[in-house]
Image: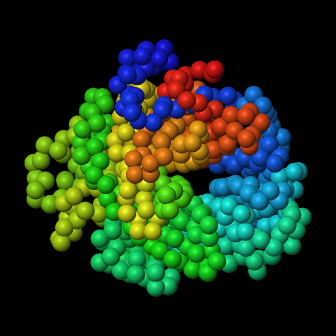
Amino acid sequence: MLTGLILTLALWRAAALPAADGPPLVSLTRLGGATVAGAEIVDFDPVSGLLFVTGADGVSVLRLHADGALGPVRTVDVGAACDLPEQMRGEVTHVMVDPAGRGFAAATVIPADRAGLQGRLVFFSTTNGEILRVVCVGTSPDCFKFSADGAYLITANEGEPVRLGGGVVTDPPGSVSVIRLDRFESAEQIRSLSQRDVRTIFFGGPVIADGLEPAHAAGTALRIHPHNRNNGTADLEPESIAVLGSTAYLTLQENNAVAAFDLRELAWSALGGLGTIDQVIDASDADGGIRIEQTVTGLPMPDQLLAFAAGGRTYLVTANEGDTRGEAGTHASPLADEQRLTQLAKAGRLTDRWAGSPLLADDRLGRLHVATDVGTDGSGRIDRPTMFGTRSVSVWDATTLARVGDTGSALERWMARLAPECFNANAEAGTFDRRSADRGPEPEGLATGMVDGRRLVFVSLERPGALAVIDLTDPTRPEVVGLTVTALLGDTAPEGLIFVPADKNPTGRPLVIGGFEVSGTVGVYAIGRGGPVVSPARE
């Protein structure tokens, strides 16, 4: 397979390059890695030179060496520190090192009883892994971030619906938990942190009410599940966070929305839907190959996001993965919300203009999974089938939530040109094209940094196992400038990514480091200019 890929690269490389007057190509070369079962989220401490990785056993601590190799140091069992029965310790969802360099890190833990028990936030020493403090936060903390100066920490408590015995569904409210940390000067002082320092804020107030106003929400495609039509705040599920200054921006993935939270005022300052994007995609896994030719409306429904300032404006960047709550008709939960287009046609859920349409063929749109509650007419039937996610990365004005840029079909097209054998695959061999009817490459993780005076954004494509590089020097013209198929190097299903500047790590080179969940690996990739767009071997 590798030999075939290299030959394919030689044939397709000229067609895949940006225009001659575009930004330069960027290559990623794998320097080293390590095995961490269930690796997902990573963070690096430039003070100690240690890398922290969430995994099945807690937080793995690795040392980054000058040649890019990783060596084991210790594992911090943050789950055991949560004072929960062993069967309730659940999963570690996020880790981050204090950006103020005070010698501590934190990790979030979701207990196995996701709806009945509060999430935990565990602080521990970066020096020796000693647990410093454990506090409770909201339900199902999926992510957290520090402000750049370390003064604040905010968790996104997703509050996902959970199916109990007998088909009963409980849907705890989403929230954020905020801790002010500017009075703590060292890791040792974190021991004095108390539960009283934690403020958990649920969705409410005039800003949220206005955002959920039916006419307003419909106009911006802010999505509230019909199950919660009479209680929209119960449906809001914060997923990921970006902090810029004293404002935290949160994706609400299932709701196709972004919210802003004022850390100083402890109040919501914005809530807005992200609308829809018409995208040209490969919509079928039964079309005999790569056919990026069907125009489909999509809900961005981003997973991770970034925030940065440029030219006097603040921008958000979103990885438009898309997400569902299961397949209607076969899923046990009454919140299931997706179905293939042909199934909806057979059930009489489409408007009359779809009767006998050739687009319903399996090799066109028939097998595409779409939302069962979006794109309907006045009768409740679907007139504009809408897919989950847009298979793209978007740039938004953070103040107005106007979309100012989008990569369009570029991620699918680059995979088709440079690694066709891995096109819309499913993180394992022999699954070529399998995800075409179901969210395609699934852009999920994001990291950004300045390299040679240009702003680059690195994107994890979860399903095929690849890292894409986008030049965002002009935020209104995002341009893909590189692609590395990490699956060919043994790193499959990339999740969280970080950018580490050359002067902050021992290799002396700018790095992208990622956690790869399915392969259970951590990969260290050096950023370079030119060279191979796909890096099938070490330098």
Q: Nearer the viewer, residue 272 or 163?
A: 272
Q: Nearer the viewer, residue 75 or 319?
A: 319
Instruction: Give the colouring mode of the picture.
Output: rainbow
Q: Is residue 438 above or below residue 236?
A: above
Q: Is residue 403 above or below residue 166?
A: above
Residue 517 occupies quadrant: top right
The C terminus lies in quadrant:
top right
- Relative horizontal placement of residue 170, taking residue 294 as reference (left or right): right
Q: Is residue 129 above or below residue 214?
A: above
Look at 42% across and 26% down and name the residue there.
Answer: 418
Q: Is residue 493 visible?
A: yes
Look at 22% across and 49% down and name the residue there.
Answer: 342
**Residue furthest bottom in the image:** 206
Q: Is residue 461 above or below residue 208?
A: above
Q: Nearer the viewer, residue 340 or 420?
A: 420
Residue 467 picture location, percent across and down: 52, 37
Residue 126 picture location, percent across and down: 83, 52
Look at 90% across and 64% down and name the residue there.
Answer: 188
Residue 512 picture location, percent across and down: 62, 39
Residue 138 occupies quadrant: bottom right
Q: Is residue 114 visible?
A: no
- Relative horizontal placement of residue 459, taking residue 47 as reference (left or right): left
- Label total for image: 0
Look at 58% across and 75% down and name the residue there.
Answer: 262
Residue 436 picture location, percent across and down: 35, 39
